[in-house]
Image (tube, grey):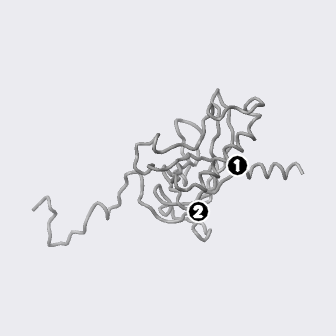
Amino acid sequence: MNSRRNNNMSQNTKVVTGINTRLSYANIWEPKSINGGKEKYSVSLIIPKSDTKTVTAIEKAIDAAIEEGIGKFGGKKPNKVALKLPLRDGDLEKDDVNYKDAYFINANSITAPQIVDKQVQPILDQAEVYSGCYARVSISFYAFNTNGNRGVACGLGNIQKIRDGEPLGGHSSASDDFTAIGEQSEPDFLA
């Protein structure tokens, strides 16, 4: 009985995002160390404010993580506004058009996410899933209290690519940068 209850509790803190979630800062193929910390897989999820179903599910999961984490907060429920929360407002915190009218969440994990296509088949080509594409992502929330930092963090689960999007991060492809030059024509700068 007790294990079933714990299993249900963890389900209260898990969310699968909607299909309009966009990946940003996608370090999902190889773990990276940030500021000398433990190597982790990580991604920033851009969630449109119009996706109220996902936003509401995330807010409920954060509340459940606070309830489940009361032990980490000294046995009593803290005031939510005093905690660091993972759901952040792109309009307020990012000077980036890609975060306009959106929330964002930074999710990470020490274990690699499974990355699949719409038919739930593994994606092996790393170029297929990148910062800027759209995906459903399973995430889970948990309370933390470390060195005076108290709040709720977001764990990265698995990723299902839904569709391509404009790549983020300033990398252009060669076909974006150049046009084909025939043997007879000269580049503009030589003309």
Which residue is situated farthest in the right direction here?
A: 1
Disc 1: which residue: 13
Mark 2 element type: strand
Say left or right for 105 vs 151. Answer: left
Q: Residue at x 79, y 52 (%)?
A: 8
Which amino acid type corresponds to the residue marked 1 in the rendered image?
Thr
Disc 2: which residue: 160
Characterize the local packing of mark 1: few (<14), some (14-19) or many (20 or more) Cα atoms within 10 angstroms.
Answer: many
Q: Which mark is residue 86?
A: none
Cα–Cα gap, marks 1 and 2: 19 Å
Residue 50: where, in percent of width, then height?
52, 55
Which badge, 1 or 2, comes first in the chain's sequence?
Answer: 1
Q: Residue at x 48, y 60 (%)?
A: 133
Relative to 156, residue 150 above or below: above
Q: Nearer the viewer, residue 125 or 8?
A: 8
Characterize the local packing of mark 2: few (<14), some (14-19) or many (20 or more) Cα atoms within 10 angstroms.
Answer: many
